[in-house]
Image: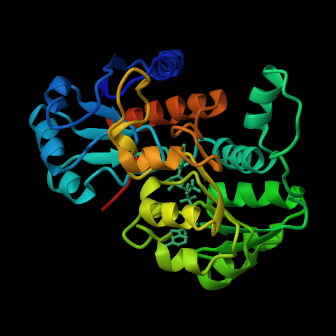
Amino acid sequence: MNVTFFNAKPYDKQFFEAANPEFGHQLKFLEVPLNEHTAVLAKDAEAVCAFVNDHADAAVLRLLAEGGTRLIAMRCAGYNNVDLKAAAELGLKVVRVPAYSPHAVAEHALALILTLNRKTHRAYNRVREGNFALTGLMGFDLHGRTVGLIGLGKIGLVTARILKGFGCRVLGFDIQHEAEADEIGVEFTDLDTLFAQSDIISLHCPLTPHTFHLINDEAIAKMKDGVMLINTSRGAIIDTKAVIKGLKCEKIKYLGLDVYEEEGDLFFEDMSAKVIQDDVFMRLLSFNNVLITGHQAFLTSDALQNIAHITLQNISDFEHGQALTNQVLP
Ligand code: NAD
């Protein structure tokens, strides 16, 4: 099938081209994001392959359908940026990669926790400048601390296993109760208990109308003083302005983000020569206890291999009229 990729980066091209000989699709890689202005570039592509910050709203989907597209193949797990109802009305099928490496994201959450705690990013710079003073680098033992995980799906469960290995007490909140969580030793609680008892809170639920701004002023007020907050899920689960207030009054002592609610205007691009116009983001960067990575939790070679293989398989299944096991329905 003819497949047009939007927002394609060199690593996407590398891993998709390596996986494609098995599938034999015609791949066209575009660097531009998918939006109302660029959708026409996919004319005659039966499948469009998009990523987390592409805009697949009703207007864009209509343009794609008019150009001959029949399949939207998301090369990611989340699909909050696709108007599924509009896609169904236009006769477009939507597929995704529900699991490619929960380890990649869980391990990145741990990287944020460990870096914020032991301040290795600051130590690295100090030592390179010949400054071996330790003042300001004190951390705490993870062993014995309580970590609350919101969302105990694939990534949340891997995170729970890793944290158990560190000797943490792990609390969990999810709208479903997987037996695997009990086997790992996660204590299921309600959200209020999780907020009140956790030294570290890590988000692993999807962005839905129910989780939008789940971490707001009210939730932060219920948290322990000095809490560490980690978000590797989706930016808008956190109300950023509320979190900034929490940082200013030192209720939140550490913040680790891989995602940001307005990341669409910033992430995945080199902005180093530009003036960043997002004042809320720049305020976040001004805190020395805030660590931000630009949506890179998925970025391991293992995950990219799996993403390419599963996406191309999804496209082949569609081409051959087979059951779409990874289809997303409204
Ligand atoms: P998953 O579907 O396996 O698990 C999500 C869990 O969240 C499920 O158990 C579900 O029941 C639970 N959940 C849903 N609504 C909830 C709510 N209101 N409150 C509490 N729990 C709720 O998904 P996953 O593979 O574990 O991924 C989790 C999220 O991580 C994805 O939705 C995506 O947004 C994010 N993600 C980020 C990256 C990255 O690079 N930063 C990569 C992959 C996934």
* x 78%, y 51%: residue: 117
> Total of numbered circles in the picture?
0
Using residue 157 as the reference point, say whether residue 175 is left or right of it. left
**Residue drawn at 48 percent across, 48 percent down:** 77
Residue positioned 35% across, 18% down in the render = 27
Q: How is the image coloured?
A: rainbow
Q: Nearer the viewer, residue 304 or 263?
A: 263
The structure residue drawn at horizontal position 18% and vertical position 23%, both measured from the top left corner, is 41
Q: Quadrant of the N terminus?
A: top left
The percent coordinates of residue 259 (x first, y second) are 50, 48
Residue 179: which quarter of the image?
bottom right
Residue 2 position, x and y percent, is 28, 22
Left of 201 or right of it: where is 260?
left
Q: Is residue 244 above or below residue 82?
A: below
* In the displayed structure image, the side of residue 149 where residue 276 appears, left or right: left
| Residue 119 visible somewhere in the drawing | yes
Q: Is residue 321 in view from this perspective?
A: no
Q: Return the residue found at the far left.
A: 66
User: Looking at the picture, does residue 176 appear above or below residue 77?
Assistant: below
Specify whether 255 is left or right of 213.
right
Q: Position of residue 66 (x, y in %)?
A: 9, 37
Where is 115 relative to 9, above or below?
A: below
Q: Quadrant of the C terminus?
A: bottom left
- Ligand 1 sits in which quadrant? bottom right
Which percent across, then down, holds residue 88? 21, 55
